[in-house]
Image (tube, rainbow, N blue to C red):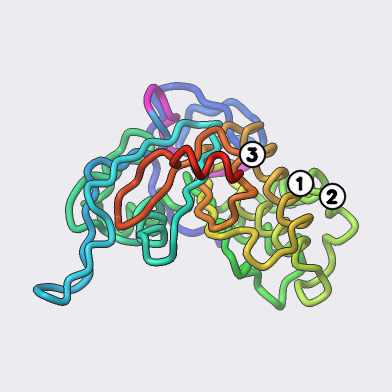
C-alpha cells in the first residue's frame, strides 16, 4: 500500500527523475513517483545567516555563526574542517533534520526553516538523498532491496522501482552483487549501494557525511568519483562533509568550516591537496 502523499499541482511540465517520462500531474504517469514543482531559477539549496546554539547562558555553544551557503544543481561542494567546527550541525541543518536558532533554509526556492515536520519530511524524501559514514544499510535486505526502500516508500510502481534500482547498481558496477546482503559485501561495495539508494529518486540534493571514513584510499576515491559522476549526470547538487582532503580535486568548490564560520578553503590548504 502506497503512503498517502497529498497531490501538488504541476504548473510546468517536468521530466520524471526515475523513469524519464514527461509529467504535469502530482504523480508521474509512467512510474507513479510523487512530483514536486520543478526547480526553476536559483540554487537547489540555500542557507542564509544561519545561527545555531546548543545550550544557554555560560554553557552555550555557538555551533554556527552567521553561515550562508548555496549549492547549485550539478555542483559538487566539499566542506572540510576540524572536529567540533560545526560540520555536523551544518549538514543536519541542510538536511532539514535540525531547525536553526535563526536564519533561513530554502530548498528549490521553498523556505523550510519554519515548515511543519510533515512538510520537511516530504521534501527530504523527494528532493534529498543521504550518504552516511556507517552506510546504514538494512542487514536483512539484499543490495537491490536496500536501493528499493526509498522508491517503494515514495509509492513508485514495483516494476519501475526494480528497473531503477538495477540500473543504478549496474552503473556502479554492482550488478553481480545485487542479491547479496550487506554482510557479504566489502566496505566499498556497501557504500556504493548507499550511493545508489541516495540517488534512487533522482534528488535535487545529495548530502554525504564522511562517505570515505570507513574505506581505504582506493575504495574511497572510487566511491566518491562514482557519486560525483552520477550526481552530475542527473544534475544533483552534492555536498560532502569530510576530513578527507584527498576528495578536494573531485569538487567544483572547497569550503572550510571552523568555529561555526564557513569560508573558502585557505590557500595553504589548497597547496596541501
- Residue carrying label 2: 173
Residue in view at x 54 percent, y 54 percent: 208
- Residue carrying label 1: 163
Residue in view at x 79 percent, y 72 percent: 181
Q: Which label number is shown at residue 250?
A: 3
Q: Is residue 142 left or right of residue 126?
A: right
Q: Decide: is 59 above or below 263.
A: below
From the top left corner, tell me how far across and down residue 185 is, in percent: 81, 69
- Answer with mark 3 or mark 1, whichever residue precedes in sequence: 1
Q: Nearest the camera: 233 or 51? A: 51
From the top left corner, tell me how far across and down residue 4 is, in percent: 44, 56
Q: Splitting the image into 4 quarters, where does residue 18 fall? A: top right
Residue in view at x 34 percent, y 38 percent: 46
Q: Is residue 154 magenta?
A: no
Assign the magenta stretch its main secondary structure: loop
Check disc 1 and report its element: helix, strand or loop.
helix
CA distance for labels 1 and 2 = 15 Å
Quarter placement of the C terminus: top right
Q: Is residue 11 left or right of residue 239?
A: left
From the top left corner, tell me how far across and down residue 151 is, in percent: 61, 53
Q: Which label number is shown at residue 32?
A: none
From the top left corner, tell me how far across and down residue 85 is, in percent: 36, 60
* Residue lying at the far right of the rendered structure: 176
Whether residues under marks 3 and 2 lie with C-beta atoms below 8 angstroms apart, the answer is no
- Around disc 1, counting alpha carbons within 10 Å, would you say few (fewer than 14), some (14 to 19), or many (20 or more)? few
Check disc 3 and report its element: helix, strand or loop.
helix
- Answer with mark 1 or mark 2, whichever residue precedes in sequence: 1
From which residue to which does the magenta span run? Answer: 31-42
Whether residues under marks 1 and 2 lie with C-beta atoms below 8 angstroms apart, the answer is no
Q: Is residue 34 magenta?
A: yes
Whether residues under marks 3 and 1 lie with C-beta atoms below 8 angstroms apart, the answer is no
Amino acid at each position: 500500500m502506497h503512503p498517502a502523499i497529498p497531490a501538488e499541482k504541476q504548473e510546468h511540465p517536468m521530466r520524471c527523475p526515475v523513469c524519464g517520462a514527461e509529467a504535469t500531474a502530482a504523480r508521474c504517469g509512467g512510474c507513479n513517483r510523487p512530483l514536486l514543482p520543478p526547480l526553476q531559477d536559483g540554487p537547489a539549496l540555500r542557507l542564509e545567516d544561519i545561527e545555531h546554539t546548543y545550550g544557554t547562558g555560560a554553557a552555550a555553544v555557538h555551533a554556527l555563526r552567521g553561515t550562508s551557503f548555496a549549492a547549485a544543481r550539478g555542483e559538487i561542494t566539499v566542506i572540510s574542517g576540524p572536529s567540533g567546527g560545526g560540520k555536523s550541525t551544518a549538514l543536519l541543518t541542510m538536511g532539514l533534520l535540525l531547525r536553526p536558532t535563526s536564519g533561513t533554509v530554502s530548498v528549490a526556492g521553498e523556505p523550510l526553516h519554519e515548515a511543519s515536520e510533515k512538510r520537511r519530511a516530504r521534501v527530504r524524501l523527494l528532493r534529498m538523498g543521504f550518504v552516511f559514514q556507517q552506510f546504514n544499510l538494512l542487514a536483512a535486505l539484499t543490495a537491490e532491496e536496500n536501493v528499493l526502500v526509498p522508491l517503494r516508500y515514495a509509492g513508485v510502481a514495483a516494476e519501475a522501482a526494480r528497473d531503477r534500482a538495477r540500473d543504478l547498481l549496474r552503473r556502479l558496477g554492482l550488478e553481480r552483487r545485487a542479491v547479496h546482503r550487506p554482510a557479504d559485501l566489502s566496505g566499498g561495495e556497501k557504500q556504493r549501494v548507499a550511493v545508489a539508494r541516495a540517488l534512487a529518486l533522482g534528488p535535487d540534493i545529495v548530502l554525504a557525511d564522511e562517505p570515505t571514513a570507513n574505506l581505504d584510499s582506493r575504495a574511497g576515491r572510487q566511491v566518491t568519483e562514482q557519486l560525483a559522476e552520477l550526481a552530475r549526470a542527473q544534475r544533483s547538487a552534492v555536498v560532502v562533509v569530510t576530513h578527507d582532503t584527498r576528495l578536494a580535486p573531485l569538487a567544483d568548490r572547497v569550503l572550510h568550516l571552523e568555529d561555526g564560520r564557513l569560508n573558502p578553503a585557505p590557500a595553504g590548504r589548497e597547496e596541501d591537496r
